[in-house]
Amino acid sequence: MRLIISFLLLAVLSISCKDDPRPKPKGFLALEYPNAEYERVDIGCPYTFDKNVIAEISPSRNRIPCWIQLDYDEMKGSVFITYQPVENNLDSLLSDAQKLPLQHTIKADLIEGDVYTNDLNRTYGMFYEVDGNAASQAQFYLTDSTHHFLTGSVYFKSLPNFDSIVPAADYLKADIRHLMESLKWNY
């Protein structure tokens, strides 16, 4: 009898020693976007560049000439581009452009700046990558130091959740780098 009770007790204990049921962690979609294809854009401004064919150009909300946005509807994101002529104000334009990424330091985990130089196209500037739950995941500026100054920022039409927007942010960062490399000034 003791032997049967011992086997029953052992069987009950082995069945009851499973992990407690726990909810599964939230999962994120595995988002994939098409390979980038670029086309040359000339919108009648003092600059031209290559843009991804999936991006739609629209005027900025401010309706300032040569301020545009590149809308990526599938990603619910936009690249906002502003242009200003350099008129003895390069120092203030540079200062403003360099302060903009710093506004995201409260929410950002990391902000990295890369110097950009293209002597062939006379474009010089910075590309800022922002990691974390900041409002903008990338920003840049370009200038020829004498006549032209252009800035750009990536924004998404949703609350910042870095983990869920990483694929889209990386895709737009690659497009920005291509835009920077292809930008030419119209003199």
Image (spheres, rainbow, N blue to C red):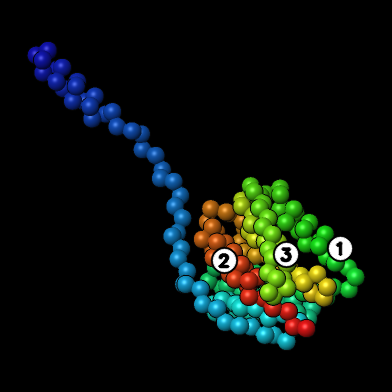
Report whether residue 101 is seen: yes
| Quarter where residue 114 is shown | bottom right
Mark 2 burial class by Cα count in 10 Å: few <14, some 14-19, many 20+: few
Residue at x 58% of width, y 72% of height: 72
Secondary structure under tag 3 reads: strand
Proximity of marks 3 and 2: CB atoms separated by less than 8 Å? no
Q: Horizontally, is 66 left or right of 10 in the view?
A: right
Question: Could you tell me how far apart the alpha carbons at marks 2 and 1 are, in whole angstroms?
Answer: 28 Å
Q: Horizontally, is 133 left or right of 148 in the view?
A: left
Secondary structure under tag 1 reads: helix
Residue at x 36% of width, y 38% of height: 21
Q: Front-most of 25 and 125?
A: 125
In primary-sequence order, the first of circles 1 and 3 is 1
- Given this view, does label 1 or label 3 mark the residue nearer the observer? 3
**Looking at the image, is 101 positioned above or below residue 90?**
above
Report whether residue 62 is seen: no
**Looking at the image, is 56 positioned above or below residue 93?**
below
> Residue tagged by mark 3?
125
> Residue tagged by mark 2?
174
Q: Residue furthest front?
A: 120
Secondary structure under tag 2 reads: helix
In primary-sequence order, the first of circles 3 and 2 is 3
Q: Could you tell me which quadrant the N terminus lies in?
A: top left
Q: Residue furthest top?
A: 2
> Residue tagged by mark 1?
92
| Quarter where residue 117 is shown | bottom right
Name the residue type under label 1: Ser
